[in-house]
Every structure is written in structure tokens, then in C-alpha cells.
Image (cartoon, rainbow, N blue to C red):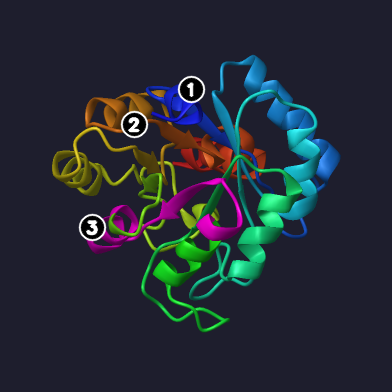
Amino acid sequence: MNSILEAIHGKLVVSVQAYPGEPLRRPDIMAALSLAVQKGGAAAIRCQGLADISAIKGQVDVPVIGLWKEGHEGVYITPTLRHAMACVHAGCDIVALDATDRPRPDGRTFEETVAEIKKQSDVLIMADCMTIEDIRRGVACGCDIVSTTLSHNKAAIDTTMDEGPDIPLLKQAATEFPGFPVVCEGHVHTPADAKAALDAGAWSVVVGTGITHPTSITSWFVAAMQN
């Protein structure tokens, strides 16, 4: 088993991202935040954008999962081979990309993209999945990790604290692919959510908004106090 996969097994991965127009959307801030969560025990960092990947890789000594978001509709998480290879060259240890069968801007299929990444690099590949069919596709074409990232089919910023992770999909995938790195990501907002995901068979658990997005966290407190 790859040493990077072993390093995150049973551990917390923290997604360190800021949305366009937000005050924290600067590579140096993302790097400092990444170092802070590493000190808190994060076993890896997930981040987006070439500048952030490079800055964060220069600060932390845990694996970095890199991606490049472009747009907000359809396939926007590392949508093409060009995006994926740029993330690789920026220094990520794992590159994450949309694993759905939706059309991609460069005309390649997901399988063709994965095969070309493997041909051009030795980086690990994380399949961000929406359905069990996506997870099966990711495993079949040789991805190293599959994740429930897209199972809710909406951005984390559009969620509430009450919407938890997709435990049913996680359980199905972990049962169908025992021992394979099936990661729980998406709507993991509390320590209880993270523990439930681990208990359901997750290889590791990714938390983003609930740790690194103060705007959302603040809004949860405000909403609770108004009810």
C-alpha cells in the first residue's frame, strides 16, 4: 500500500479553500491556515488552485491533495487533463478530479483523463464521485482513492449544519470495495459526523467548511441564535 494512503488511513484530512471574493482568498493565508490545521492533527490538506497548492506545499509536511476549480456548473473540479497536469506540476501529491460521466471541456472521458495522468506522472489520483456508479468507475479505471465529494450535488457554501455526510453511499462503497480507500467528503460539519463516517467504513474523512470557512461557521451560530 502506498505510504501516502497509509498516512491518511483512519485520519482527518482538512480542505483549506476560500471562495472567490472572500477576504481569506490569498495563497499566503491558505498556507498559514493549512499549517494551523496540520498542528491540530490534520493528516493531509486538500486545496484548490495552482497558487494555493504551491504555497501550501511549501508550508506543510503532510500530503497535499490538489485540484483546480473552473466554473460552477457541470464538471468544474479539475475538468480537463490540462488542469490536472498543472496541479501535478504545482506540487500536489494527489490530484482530485470529477469522476462523473458528464461531458468535459476537452472532450476526453474520465477514463481517458485518468490513463493520461498515469502516463505522464506518478501522482496519486482521487476520484470525486456523485454516485455509486462513479465510485465503480473510479475503481475500475485505476484511481487510487474514491470520495463521496459530489454526492450532495451542491457546493459546501450552500449547505447548512444540519445536512450531514452521505453515510448510505459511503457504506455501500465500503461494502462493495472492502479495503479500498473510500473517503468520506462533503457535509461533515461536526466531530460526531466525522466519527460516524469513520465507523461507516471511511478510509479517511475530509472536513472543509466546518473547520476552515469562518463565514459559514459564523452564519450557523447566527441562525441558531435567531431561532
Residue type at mark 2? Trp
Label 1, label 3: how far apart the Cα atoms are: 25 Å
Label 2, label 3: how far apart the Cα atoms are: 16 Å
> Which is more N-terminal, label 3 or label 2?
3
* Res. 203 mark: 2
Q: Is residue 143 left or right of residue 78?
A: left
> Which is more N-terminal, label 2 or label 1?
1
Q: Is residue 60 left or right of residue 123?
A: right
- For the residue carrying disc 3, how many other residues have a C-alpha within 10 Å: few (<14), some (14-19), or many (20+)? some
Residue under label 3: 132
| Residue 10 rendering spot, x and y as whole percentages | 37, 22
Q: Quadrant of the N terminus?
A: top left
Residue 19 visible in this rendered orientation of the protein: no
In the rendered image of this protein, does residue 36 appear above or below residue 169? above
Q: Nearer the viewer, residue 81 or 157?
A: 81
Secondary structure state at the residue bearing disc 3: helix
Which residue: 49% across, 68% down?
113
Residue type at mark 3? Ile
Label 1, label 2: how far apart the Cα atoms are: 11 Å
Q: Quadrant of residue 174?
A: top left
Secondary structure state at the residue bearing disc 1: helix
* Res. 7 mark: 1
Which residue: 15% across, 45% down?
176
Q: Nearer the viewer, residue 221 or 187?
A: 187
| Residue 202 rendering spot, x and y as whole percentages | 30, 33
Residues in magenta, as a range: 118-139
Q: Quadrant of residue 178?
A: top left
Secondary structure state at the residue bearing disc 2: loop
Q: Are marks 2 and 3 in contact (CB under 8 Å)?
A: no
In the rendered image of this protein, does residue 9 appear above or below residue 57? above
